[in-house]
Image: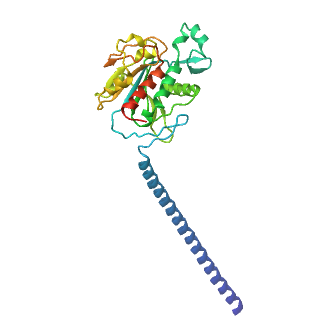
Amino acid sequence: MLRPCGIKGQKRKKREERYDKEEDEVEAEEQSIERAKRAMVEEKEMAMETSGKEEEELEGQTHEMAGIPIVPSDLKTKKPGLIFVLERASLEVAKVGKSYQILNSDDHANFLRKNNKNPADYRPDIVYQALLSILDSPVNKAGRLRAVYVKTDKGVLFEVKPHVRIPRTYKRFAGIMLQLLQQLSITAVGKREKLLRVIKNPVTQYLPVNSRKIDFLDFASGFSYSSEKLVKMNKYVAAVSDDVDIVFVVGAMAHGKIDCDYIDDFIAISGYPLSAAWCISRICEAVADKWDVL
């Protein structure tokens, strides 16, 4: 009689011990889960803090945009700078076939004739070469180029940041101009900085008040001899005050001329017709000599 009672009692004890162990294991698992959750929360908070610090450290720096690398330059200089305004740039968008394109005289001559337009007027390569001359100049790399503004033949005004590096091929440049005119801006990758953006007219609201505005329009259009004031570029720039920014207005069209009512002086630097790119290279060389930029 005692034997079965003893067996039952032992079994009860073992079951109770087993239940206690299971409860302990459940509690241990819950605690480990809570600790893991706390660790994850702490890691997220630390990641947010570090990312915030990194953003603060990176503030003011430039990032590269796909297709348009950024040229490092001393952007913090407070010395007088150089500003270019390219007027009447031939950048017109049209639907040719099934796609939109920037019209040019080489690829769209038949399309332009069918629409009663003169192919000679559609020369986007002129503004392309002009931008290359400006942005590749030592004056820009030294951080003395303040801004570049381009106004199309249709009156669209857009800004090009000085630290942008224009693509080396015209085909890629035309694609970027098409994207700019359709989307109104191009933003750098990794940051919300607009490297190119369409802005409101007139351009005078963006020019410094104390700047000297000089018009070289007739050089680009092939009428450099039309100005009565023929000067040597180095001497002319050297006479400009060192306390003012210099604004040069250059025509970016194949032929013709425009009227600018905000110009302080209209000069000629050669008795021969010059392209916009060659005119800009002379300007940048003279300004670099004035400011000792090598």
Quadrant the C terminus occupies: top left
Determine which quarter of the picture holds residue 223.
Answer: top left
Residue placed farthest to the bottom in the image? 2
Q: Nearer the viewer, residue 140 or 192?
A: 140
Q: Is residue 226 visible?
A: yes
Q: How is the image coloured?
A: rainbow
Query: Where is residue 126 drawn, in percent x and y?
Result: 51, 20
Tell me if residue 206 can be seen: no
What is the residue that sits farthest to the top in this orientation?
116
Q: On the picture, is 270 further left or further right than 7? A: left
Q: How many marks?
A: 0
Residue 234, position in %: x, y? 37, 25
Out of 223 and 19, give the one closest to the viewer.
223
Image: 255 above or below 187: above
- Residue 171's x, y, as percent? 58, 25
Task: Judge from the rendering whether residue 11 lies leftward or rightward of residue 242; answer left or right.
Answer: right
Q: In the rendered view, tell whether residue 57 sits above or below residue 33.
A: above
Q: Residue at x 45, y 11 (%)?
A: 256
Q: Quadrant of the N terminus?
A: bottom right
